[in-house]
Image: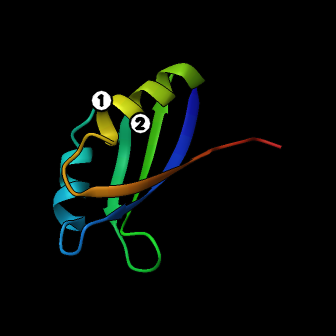
Amino acid sequence: MVQAYILIQTEVGKASTVADTIGKITGVIQAEDVTGPYDVIVRAQSETVDELGRMVVAKIQQVDGITRTLTCPVVHL
């Protein structure tokens, strides 16, 4: 299982809507709107890195109101 945090910047006033929409995507564990340089932080999981990449590109980045994403895979050192 691969997990990642996805940091998202949104258009002004869209963070709550974006977080709600992303929270319904299969594989998303949690989606929260936050303050700071990013507007939404998502924790997601998938079986493989490739599946995670497809989720980000094909599902998450397609949500209306997103301007930029940064995917940070979780590593266990």
Marks counted in the figure total 2
Q: Is residue 13 above or below residue 41?
A: below
Q: Residue at x 72, y 42 (%)?
A: 75
Numbered circle sitting on residue 55: none
**In contact (CB < 8 Å): disc 2 and disc 1:** no
Tell me where residue 19 sits by quadrant. Answer: bottom left
Left or right for 45, reference 24: right
Residue to which mark 2 is pinned: 56
Q: Nearer the viewer, residue 11 or 29?
A: 11
Q: Position of residue 65 (x, y in %)?
A: 22, 57
Q: Residue at x 26, y 46 (%)?
A: 22
SS category of the residue bearing label 2: helix
Task: Tell me the distance, in whole angstroms, between the alpha carbons under discs 2 and 1.
Answer: 11 Å
Q: Residue at x 36, y 39 (%)?
A: 28
Q: Earlier in the sequence, mark 2 or mark 1?
A: 1
Which residue sits furthest front? 67
Q: Position of residue 73 (x, y in %)?
A: 62, 42
SS category of the residue bearing label 1: loop
Q: Amino acid at mark 2?
A: Val
Q: Is residue 77 above or below residue 25?
A: below
Residue to which mark 1 is pinned: 26
Tell me where residue 62 sits by quadrant. Answer: top left
Quadrant of the frame with the C terminus: top right
The scheme the figure's colours follow is: rainbow
Q: Amino acid at mark 1?
A: Thr
Q: Nearer the viewer, residue 58 or 74?
A: 58
Left or right for 17, reference 60: left
Which residue sits furthest bottom? 36
Q: Position of residue 53 (x, y in %)?
A: 50, 29
